[in-house]
Amino acid sequence: MYLTFNQFTVNLFLLSIQTPTKASLSETETHHCVKVLRHKIGDAVHGIDGNGNYVKGIIQEISKKETLIHIEEITENWGEKPQKLVLAVSPLRQKDRFEWLIEKAIELGVDEIFPIICKNSITDNVKPDRIQQIIISAVKQCKRAKIPQLHAAIPIEKWLETVILPEKYIGLLAFCETENALSQLHSQIQKAENVYFAIGPEGDFIEKEVQLAATKGFQIVSLGKSRLRTETAGLFALSVIKAVQGW
């Protein structure tokens, strides 16, 4: 559904829908709305509830702790694609690189994120509160209405135990040592509507991890002949998926 405002320039706020005609901004969002952007009572505002709904409304009341909004329009499943994309990726020693990857993954359409701890992972230090804020900011930046789910860090073996690929899903694992050609990545993506994609640590997956993933139905794929950093591999793979699936 196309909306009447310029969706590439409007500021989006994360809000809470209380009734079909009433929504509110938290204290943090109120500060951004009122103190930073200088909105006042009677101004039109645009927001998302994090569950897939876009809201257009008018500011009715402002206090230090919240802003009350009269809802004029609600659009369900706004800014979301029909396909589902799940990313499993090892945390990185340099946390800023990992956070950058998470931000770009959200912009490229990821719906769920699993930090996986592998044999060659250098750290398991994932700061969920900080990453959650990065996710929310990225969602608003790229005009999505549903906040992707961030899971707790988990050893890859335990994660693979929980993975049951449903119908119309495909599991892909990028591995530097595979003899599969890059072209096979494209063909595998074209076969499925929904994708699980696993990216390893700086030292890549070990053979045991690759074999375990294969027993769970994952296809082992190449990202090309050059060796890529984890964050580069993630960005490349997600971009290919977005291009092939055409959303």
Image: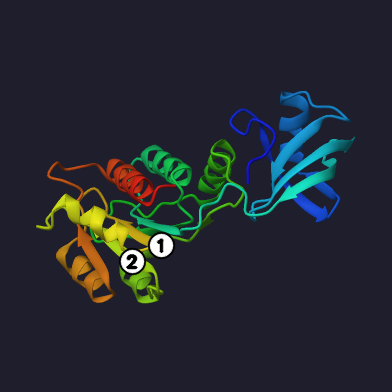
Is the Cβ of the residue at disc 2 closer than 8 Å to that at disc 1?
A: yes
**Label of residue 170 in the image:** 2
Q: Is residue 235 left or right of residue 67?
A: left
Depth check, front residue: 151 or 245 = 245
Query: How many numbered badges does the structure rendering display?
Result: 2
Q: Quadrant of residue 142?
A: top right
**Residue type, mark 1 in image:** Asn
Depth check, front residue: 175 or 244 = 244
Q: Is residue 12 above or below residue 20?
A: above
The residue at 24%/57% (across/down) is 187
Residue 103 position, x and y percent, is: 46, 41
Residue 67 position, x and y percent, is: 83, 39
Q: Is residue 213 above or below residue 12?
A: below
Is residue 62 visible to us here?
no
Residue 81 position, x and y percent, is: 51, 52
**Label of residue 194 in the image:** 1
**Residue type, mark 2 in image:** Ile
Q: Is residue 222 above or below residue 218?
A: above
Secondary structure category for the residue under label 2? strand
Depth check, front residue: 172 or 121 = 172
Q: Is residue 198 left or right of residue 27?
A: left
